[in-house]
Amino acid sequence: MSLFELFLIAVGLSMDACAVSICKGLSVGRASLKHCLIAGLYFGVFQALMPLIGYLLGVQFQGIITSIDHWIAFVLLALIGLNMVKESRSAPEDESPDFSPRAMFPLAIATSIDALAVGVTFAFLSVDIAPAVTFIGVITFVLSAIGVRIGAAAGARFKSGAELFGGLVLIVMGTKILLEHLGFIA
């Protein structure tokens, strides 16, 4: 696998994490370096870890993982999105967005489920896994950190509906993943 092919895979895998980072940034009045690093680290580490796990599992569980990854991603994103929609309708308790492990961990898992299946594919292709997962992690880190900044810039102008919009985006992303894997969307 060429470096360019790996770059395309890394960018493709990181798009969900980048979109979620933009949503997280929407509720930030001003994105700090800490917000960017937290999002980048969570999403980058999980986007690197999942293909490694997939690679190690190899062909043994390919049918099981591939057959349910879209359901797992859909359920996690839908639940997180519904919670964000619900929170957008209640009185704000805290103006700062939730970048705690309790909030970031499920998002990192939900956005990296597809990377698990890619790792299984890497096992078939005999990809040198250490540089591949490092590259994927770094690309995801950078795009996620930038995503928080982009979301924060938009959130400063459109703060009132940011959380509602972010929740709806997550629900749509989860639904899209499900419909793609069920063959309804090409």
Image (cartoon, helix red, strand yellow):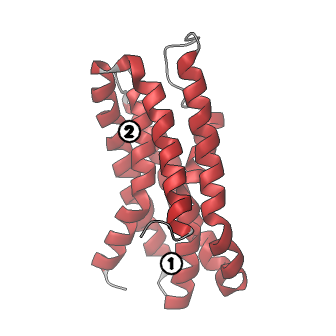
Q: Earlier in the sequence, mark 2 or mark 1?
A: 2
Callout 1 crowding tier (Cα within 10 Å): few <14, some 14–19, many ≥20: some
The image shows residue 45, relative to residue 90, as above or below, that is: below
Work out which residue is located at the far front of the displayed protein and give it: 184
In percent of the image, x 59 and y 79: which residue is there?
A: 120
In percent of the image, x 55 and y 28: which residue is there?
A: 85
In percent of the image, x 45 and y 43: which residue is there?
A: 20
Where does residue 80 sit, x and y in percent of width and height? Answer: 60, 38
The image shows residue 94, relative to residue 170, as above or below, that is: above
Residue occupied by mark 1: 129
Q: Which SS class for mark 2? A: helix
Q: Could you tell me the amino acid type at mark 2? A: Ile
Where does residue 70 sit, x and y in percent of width and height? Answer: 60, 62
Q: For this view, does 117 lie left or right of residue 145?
A: right
Where does residue 6 sit, x and y in percent of width and height? Answer: 36, 75
Q: Quadrant of the C terminus?
A: bottom left
CA gap between label 2 and label 1 equals 29 Å
Callout 2 crowding tier (Cα within 10 Å): few <14, some 14–19, many ≥20: many
- Residue 105 can be seen in this image: no
Q: Nearer the viewer, mark 2 or mark 1?
A: 2
Q: Quadrant of the N terminus?
A: bottom left
Residue occupied by mark 2: 22
99 or 171: which is nearer to us?
171
